Image (spheres, rainbow, N blue to C red):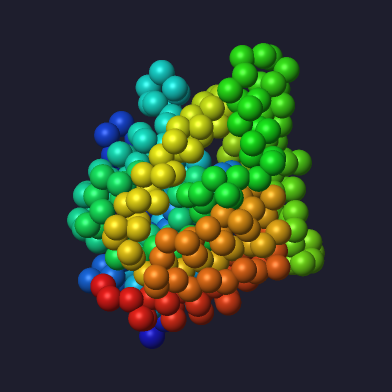
Amino acid sequence: MNAQSTNPNPVLHKTQQVDSVQLFYREAGDPSKPTLLLLHGFPSSSFMFRNLIPLLKNHYHVIAPDYPGFGFSDAPSPEKFEYTYENFSVLLEKFLAIKKIEKFHLYIFDYGAPVGMRLIQRRPEMLLSLISQNGNIYMDGIGELLKKSGQQAASDKEEDKKEVYKLFELPFMKWKYTNGVSDPSKISPDGYNLDALLMARPGNKEIQYLLRRNYKTNLAEYPKWQETLRRLQPRVLVIWGANDEVFIKEGAEAFKRDFKNLEFHLYPTGHFVLEEYYEDAASRILSFLANTKS
């Protein structure tokens, strides 16, 4: 038997040149099927979807890119690439055009929310449905930790910059993965250790600092994104870690104000729901998408 035939639908690991940046991405499933676009957050990469993609790939075309400065994508210097959420969204739009993806179901997590929503703001016709997994678009969802780091990032004081830089070190990353979980022993160290190793690339902490300073631009866009989604009224699935201290559960509850067709699930965990509950999340995603027109 041909060994290849035993795995007819593998998860592929690819790169794509987009302008001057080499983007890494994971892709699986039949491209003729509806696309599910998975957008990661901080400090993670498409690696956070390593357990989810295999459970979805037989039903959908699944694609998960790494942003510049994250995962295995290029990390050009700030002199060569402008590290803003707007620029990430523009690069993503170009990437999708190269891949000939015109419509998609959108999964947003953490930084994936401002990246994905900026794209939808420009190209609302591309959105088939929205899945938010701790992907915040409401002021209600901003936790005290995020408020404090935002104030420090906006400051020009050296001591505040040092405090923000601590967000890019292993202890905070481990905390972000394990805080609020039901059992820390369930959380593989692979995720936060890989994030820390990649974050330690020369110049990458300055890149992350620039993105943290730029985060305030997202808050000003929240009302516009909400208005666009109210107008579009996509089907929405919320799967949220109830114990997340970064994007608190009030941000999940806020979706109930705006959407007539909403599925809502809180999990007894922290920021990274998929580290504990990827199987249940996959089941809910498949059920949700099966009832969504493509």
Query: Residue drawn at (62%, 19%), measured in percent from left and top?
Result: 155
Residue situated in front as seen by the camera: 292 or 181? 292
Q: Position of residue 209 (x, y in %)?
A: 57, 27
Q: Quadrant of residue 187?
A: bottom right
Identified at 60% across, 36% down, the residue is 199
Residue 274 location (% of width, % of height): 59, 64
- Up/down of 36 relative to 7, above or below: above
Res. 5 in view: no
Task: Please tell me how many numbered marks the rendered image carries.
Answer: 0
* Quarter of the figure with residue 236: bottom left
Pinpoint residue 100: horizontal percent, then vertical percent. 20, 56
Q: Residue at x 69, y 21 (%)?
A: 160
Query: Residue 132 location, x and y as percent?
Result: 48, 60
Q: Quadrant of the C terminus?
A: bottom left
Depth check: give the residue in front, 40 or 218: 218
**Foreground residue, 260 or 85?**
260
| Residue pictured at 38% horizontal, 60% vertical | 106
Residue 182 in view of the camera: yes
Looking at this rendering, what residue extends furthest in the top direction?
Answer: 157
Farthest bottom residue?
A: 1
- Quadrant (top left/top right/bottom left/bottom right) for the N terminus: bottom left
Q: Looking at the image, which residue sits at the far front? A: 257
In the rendered structure, the answer to whether residue 182 lies left or right of residue 281 reads right
Left or right side of 124 for 132: right
Would residue 95 appear left or right of 111 to someone viewing this image? left
